[in-house]
């Protein structure tokens, strides 16, 4: 077990570099004119252009240019220097400021997914084809049919502006993050719900349930101990992946509710063709995936004793 | 089920109108009773400024904050004419050598007096090429600019502008490289603000992250530091010798997307949204805010440009026919809820020297004449209009396209590019983008600030490559005149050439459209779309 | 009957495939849910291929003078903000939307199984490698990949149709499904019947395809059918950012995102494309459910 974890941690280092390389390459490929992108629609002063080109080596093109710029970046990174944005802000500071917001937001969202999505999924799965199951299907369809930007707008307009239940925008309180988290989690919640209900109803038909029934076990125990435990593997996996998706996918939600988190900074950095910032944000994101996925994989062994890691 | 629910929602806005109407009368009553609090704090929605160093600030949000922190040499009156502010007088005989006398008694927020050196230091820093300042080119009129900007990879031999001379503590003499009649007007731009001695380190460079703890000479001083992506707070500077603000401070709340700030004003969480009202909110703003939704003139000019490398639009008849097939008023009414106005001239109506309808018949909506002219001039069967998807232009570009399709019988495609830089790059690579949209707002109120960057051969924003030697000459002659009136004569002649050549299609002049909460009164937004922070009052405690 | 099939499977491996498929088909034929979903899917496919059967109005014939006119008269669904017929746009939007949705889902499904199955089945370094690939792909922001793929590679300025959009969405959208497949495979490979098959000398390929795949199918179908809907909606996000489908393509996603800002003035431009999108997803979810149930030996 310990060896397994150590091996996974070592893989993490490699993955980290793989990610930085790929994302840096993508940013390199996407680059048109970062200096113009920085100032929007205004004309750029030649002085600014010269200065930024020289400072960020923007004149290095082609394959060799790419590797020399990537090498610059990595060697700074290894010395603990995340670099600066083209606008001159420290990327380290941006990350330190943005991550807490996004972590809080996605933590609340994932709690919603677990509390509402999985619970409702269990209920729906036990009575597959019942009224509750159909109701949850309808909910899923509504969430899919109304994309997140519409949902966010509707939620903000009615729950915040009209009825004043929630604050309209981020106020740096946990309470003000509830509405955005609800919007953010809606799709994951619907998917988790369908997945749980499918998984539960699948397991209800498994042989061991029949055996347990014929042994005369109480239905509550069958569901609570055997079915639930066996159904959880795909659900835990899904939630693990979804945590990452929620953090990366908060671009729209963070915009609507003015949360200065990772999604917003990522969007801005992509739009201003700010390679170092994008790479830094995505690398942290990937490290979080890796940790979460390691935990999920370890959970498999807990949920199913037949699974062993060596 | 969904249909019924949505139908019920549409009934709600009516309730909103009624509710807010009642709310409004009650409130204006309380304002009339003089419930303003001289120590209250006003919150203002802005986007994250790029920078707060004056010579590096070209974005509107940064400019808005600088309005609070600094006092410019000149401000502008109702007719957009420059009037002295921090300057006591600005005089010249030949439009080339300018003498600027400063008012005494102004101090930076650290107590340091504002002197001629405060300006010289700041301007030298801004003009010095290797500092890479965004507003660097505003110093180009000053003698010695070229020596400070020898081009990429060259280090300038000097770091001071030879045209700047300190005559005494409060007098500054500026020598330009050529006569320039609009120099006084230009001095109101944020790039020409002073900086205190404490801003500079021993090496002559700026102190690291000076802009996070900016020290200015304006009516407000920083309270705490700039919390990036979140807020900038300023408080009244009590030693300010100029006109004092009527509020205790201003909290600039930073929004990632200014359009989302609208809802915060609706719920009174934010006091003023001076810029950035989204197009879709214009339709409901009057209902949501009543008389707390207001307009004021602004300098923005929106137009369609024809790339000169595209031979399909080389015939002026084609360009004029397209212009005549666009129903400007229809678009202004339906899409912009009359919050902008149709443009039929090539410079903004806020300027001295502006004339109505210089474009003439070519900017009138005459669909059948347009079609005739288009056919006669052998216009292309497919028209494309490129726009940047990040600026909220989709609705009106689409509408223009639909009008061209109906009126000219062509296919018209509205082509989005992810961002403005992508659009520009395609134009620079001479790719067949078709027509493309552009907008321009002035840095200082002069016709020259439109004519020269937009239409002169080497104009900084002339991306479409229009070039007319006679036009260039007229603009140059205008800028060398010694009086504004004389200059305008030349500028207007130059504008007449534009009407003949039609290098771009004028579409709209924008206005400031702004909303504010029930707590604030005397809200005004100026020509540069900056909120007036001196006159505003608040009842907030 | 399922016992018969099982016996047949043991005694006559050569005929097994046909009989399993035949069994499933017989089960499907009697399932009304299957027929309803097939009906809806066929309806939408016909709409996508022959939009002229449903409307004679050109979806790009728009007049600002009719902006946001309510449903009624000649226009059943009313007019949108640009003054285009909402019904015509919804009908014509079916093609691009369904193409994007189905292609992206197929692409994502193939990738999910191609990566998730071996990762879960073989474990060890195969799993390590493939799982890390998934981690990296998960980290790549959709917007960035879309800009590179659609903006740089798929040539600038031209209307390149739905393929690159579908590949982009599918190419990034398979990771959740792949992880779910991997998880099911890990849990299935420990099951007694898999051990038994291995003992009997079945090869890896046979075990994976015959014994594990059907078990990994159920959760993957759930995730993928929902993903189909989100792909259609995600296309709108890309178009909104200026890197997705370009005019004159008409799609539900684009119409939904265009209608959203004016929602407080008019609901009908949003309602209809949303409803059609939801119906499509419903049809695919039901179809997926029915097929899965039919192929599941435990269910019969």
Image (cartoon, rainbow, N blue to C red):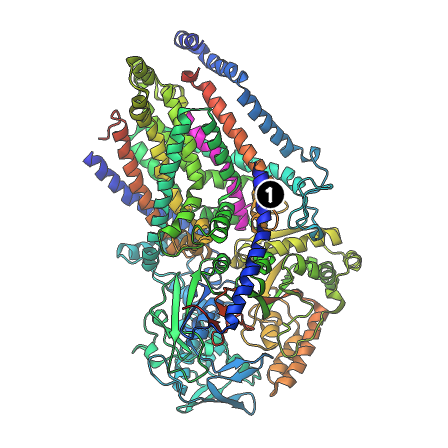
Judge from the rendering whether residue B174 lies leftward or rightward of residue C264; answer left or right.
left
Residue C195 lies within the magenta run: no
Residue C233 lies within the magenta run: yes
Q: Position of residue A64 (x, y in %)?
A: 39, 54
Q: Residue at x 37, y 48 (%)?
A: A105
Instruction: Name the quadrant containing residue C245.
Output: top right
Q: Residue at x 61, y 60 (%)?
A: B437
- The residue lying toward the viewer, choosing from B60 and B6, is B6
Q: Position of residue A215 (x, y in %)?
A: 28, 13
Please, is residue A210 above or below residue A309 in the view?
above
Judge from the rendering whether residue C130 lies leftward or rightward of residue A140; answer left or right.
left
Q: Quadrant of the N terminus of chain B?
A: top right
- On the question of residue B128 being in view, the answer is no
Q: Quadrant of the C terminus of chain B?
A: bottom left
Judge from the rendering whether residue B80 lies leftward or rightward of residue A295; answer left or right.
right
Q: How many marks?
A: 1
- The residue lying toward the viewer, choosing from B161 and A137, is A137
Instruction: Name the quadrant containing residue B394.
Output: bottom right
Please, is residue C181 above or below residue B225 in the view?
above
- The residue lying toward the viewer, choosing from C274 and A286, is C274
Q: Position of residue B398 (x, y in %)?
A: 64, 53
Q: Position of residue B158 (x, y in %)?
A: 39, 81
Q: Chain of mark 1?
A: B
Q: Residue at x 42, y 29 (%)?
A: C220
Prevailing secondary structure of the magenta residues: helix
Which residues lie in the magenta part? Answer: C218-244
Judge from the rendering whether residue B119 lies leftward or rightward of residue C192; answer left or right.
right
- On the question of residue B83 being in view, the answer is yes
- The residue lying toward the viewer, choosing from A109 and B127, is A109
Which residue does the numbered mark 1 point to in the structure image? B7
Secondary element under disc 1, as helix, strand or loop, is helix
* Crowding at mark 1 (Cα within 10 Å: few <14, some 14-19, many 20+): some
């Amino acid at each position: 077990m310990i060896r397994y974890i150590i091996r996974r941690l070592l893989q993490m280092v490699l993955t980290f570099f793989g990610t930085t390389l790929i994302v840096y390459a993508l940013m390199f490929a996407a680059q048109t004119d970062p200096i113009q992108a920085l100032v929007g629609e205004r004309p750029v002063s030649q002085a600014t252009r010269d200065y930024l080109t020289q400072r960020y080596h923007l004149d290095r093109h082609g394959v060799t240019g790419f590797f020399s710029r990537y090498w610059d970046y990595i060697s700074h990174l290894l010395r603990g220097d995340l670099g600066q944005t083209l606008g001159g802000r420290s990327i380290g500071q941006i990350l330190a400021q943005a991550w807490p917001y996004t972590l809080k937001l996605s933590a609340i969202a994932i709690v919603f997914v677990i509390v509402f999505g999985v619970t409702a999924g269990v209920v729906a799965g036990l009575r597959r084809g019942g009224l509750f199951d159909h109701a949850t299907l309808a909910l899923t369809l509504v969430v899919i049919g109304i994309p997140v930007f519409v949902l966010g707008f509707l939620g903000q307009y009615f729950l915040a502006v009209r009825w004043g239940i929630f604050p309209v925008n981020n106020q740096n309180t946990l309470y003000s993050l509830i509405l955005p988290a609800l919007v953010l989690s809606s799709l994951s919640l619907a998917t988790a719900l369908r997945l749980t209900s499918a998984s539960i109803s699948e397991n209800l038909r498994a042989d061991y349930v029949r055996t347990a029934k014929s042994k005369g076990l109480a239905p509550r125990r069958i569901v609570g101990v055997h079915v639930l435990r066996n159904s959880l593997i795909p659900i835990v996996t899904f939630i693990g992946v979804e945590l990452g998706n929620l953090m990366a996918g908060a671009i729209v939600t963070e915009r609507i509710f003015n949360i200065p988190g990772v999604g917003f900074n990522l969007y801005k950095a992509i739009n201003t063709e700010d390679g170092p910032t994008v790479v830094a944000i995505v690398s942290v994101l990937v490290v979080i995936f890796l940790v979460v996925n390691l935990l999920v994989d370890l959970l498999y062994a807990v949920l199913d004793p037949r699974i062993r890691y060596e | 089920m969904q249909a019924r629910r949505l139908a019920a929602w549409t009934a709600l806005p009516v309730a909103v109108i009624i509710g807010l109407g009642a709310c409004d009368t009650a409130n204006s009553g309380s304002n009339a009773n003089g419930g303003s609090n001289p120590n209250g704090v006003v919150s203002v929605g802005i986007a994250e400024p790029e920078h707060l160093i004056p010579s590096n600030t070209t974005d509107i949000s940064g400019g808005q904050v600088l309005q609070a922190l600094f006092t410019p040499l000149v401000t502008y009156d109702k007719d957009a004419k420059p009037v002295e502010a921090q300057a006591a007088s600005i005089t010249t005989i030949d439009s080339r050598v300018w003498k600027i006398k400063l008012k005494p008694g102004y101090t930076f927020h650290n107590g340091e007096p504002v002197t001629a050196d405060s300006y010289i230091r700041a301007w030298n820093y801004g003009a010095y090429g290797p500092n890479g300042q965004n507003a660097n080119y505003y110093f180009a009129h000053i003698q010695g600019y070229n020596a400070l900007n020898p081009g990429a990879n060259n280090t300038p031999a000097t770091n001071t502008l030879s045209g700047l001379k300190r005559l005494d503590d409060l007098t500054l003499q500026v020598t330009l490289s050529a006569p320039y009649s609009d120099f006084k007007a230009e001095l109101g731009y944020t790039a020409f603000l002073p900086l205190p001695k404490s801003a500079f380190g021993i090496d002559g460079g700026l102190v690291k992250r000076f802009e996070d703890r900016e020290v200015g000479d304006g009516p407000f001083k920083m309270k705490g530091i700039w919390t990036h992506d979140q807020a900038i707070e300023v408080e009244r500077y009590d030693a300010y010798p100029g006109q004092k603000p009527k509020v205790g401070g201003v909290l600039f709340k930073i929004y990632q997307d200014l359009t989302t700030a609208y809802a915060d004003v609706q719920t009174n969480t934010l006091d003023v949204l001076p810029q950035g009202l989204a197009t879709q909110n214009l339709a409901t703003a009057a209902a949501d805010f009543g008389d707390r939704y207001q307009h004021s003139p602004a300098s923005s000019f929106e137009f369609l440009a024809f790339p000169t490398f595209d031979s399909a639009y080389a015939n002026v008849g084609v360009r004029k026919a397209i212009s005549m097939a666009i129903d400007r008023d229809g678009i202004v009414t339906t899409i912009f809820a009359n919050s902008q106005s149709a443009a039929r001239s090539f410079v903004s109506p806020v300027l001295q020297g502006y004339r109505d309808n210089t474009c003439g018949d070519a900017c009138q909506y005459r669909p059948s004449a347009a079609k005739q002219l288009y056919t006669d001039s052998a216009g292309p069967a497919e028209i494309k209009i490129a726009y940047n998807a990040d600026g909220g232009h989709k609705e009106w570009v689409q509408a223009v396209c639909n009008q061209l399709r109906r009126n000219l019988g062509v296919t018209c495609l509205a082509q989005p590019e992810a961002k403005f830089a992508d659009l520009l790059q395609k134009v620079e690579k001479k790719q067949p983008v078709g027509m493309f949209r552009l907008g321009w707002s002035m840095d200082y109120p002069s016709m020259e600030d439109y004519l020269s960057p937009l239409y002169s051969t080497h104009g900084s924003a002339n991306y479409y490559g229009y070039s007319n030697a006679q036009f260039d000459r007229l603009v140059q002659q205008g800028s060398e005149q010694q009086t504004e009136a004389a200059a305008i004569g030349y500028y207007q002649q130059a504008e007449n050439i534009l009407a003949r050549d039609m290098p771009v299609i004028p579409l709209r002049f924008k206005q400031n459209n702004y909303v504010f909460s029930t707590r604030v009164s005397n809200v005004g937004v100026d020509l540069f779309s900056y909120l007036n922070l001196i006159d505003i009052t608040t009842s907030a405690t | 009957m399922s016992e018969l099939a099982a016996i047949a499977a043991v005694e006559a491996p050569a005929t097994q495939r046909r009989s399993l498929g035949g069994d499933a088909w017989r089960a499907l034929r009697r399932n009304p849910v299957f027929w309803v979903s097939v009906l809806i899917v066929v309806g939408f496919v016909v709409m996508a291929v022959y939009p002229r059967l449903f409307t004679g109005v050109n979806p790009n014939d728009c007049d600002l003078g009719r902006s946001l006119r309510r449903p009624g008269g000649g226009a059943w669904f009313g007019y949108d903000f640009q003054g285009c017929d909402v019904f015509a746009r919804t009908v014509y939007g079916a093609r691009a939307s369904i193409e994007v949705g189905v292609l992206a889902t197929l692409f994502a499904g193939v990738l999910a199984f191609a990566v998730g199955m071996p990762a879960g089945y073989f474990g060890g370094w195969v799993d390590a490698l493939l799982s890390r690939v998934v981690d990296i792909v998960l980290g790549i922001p959709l917007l960035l990949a879309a800009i590179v793929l659609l903006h740089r590679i798929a040539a600038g300025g031209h209307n390149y149709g739905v393929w690159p959009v579908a590949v982009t969405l599918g190419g990034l959208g398979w990771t959740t499904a792949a992880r779910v497949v991997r998880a099911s495979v890990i849990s299935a490979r420990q099951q007694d019947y898999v051990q038994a098959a291995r003992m009997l000398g079945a090869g890896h390929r046979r075990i994976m395809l015959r014994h594990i795949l059907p078990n990994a199918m159920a959760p993957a179908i759930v995730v993928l059918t929902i993903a189909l809907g989100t792909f259609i909606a995600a296309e709108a996000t890309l178009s909104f950012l200026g890197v997705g489908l370009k005019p004159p393509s008409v799609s539900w996603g684009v119409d939904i995102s265009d209608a959203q800002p004016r929602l407080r003035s008019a609901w009908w431009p949003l309602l209809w494309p949303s409803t059609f999108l939801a119906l499509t997803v419903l049809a695919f979810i039901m179809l997926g459910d029915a097929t899965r149930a039919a192929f599941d030996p435990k269910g019969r």
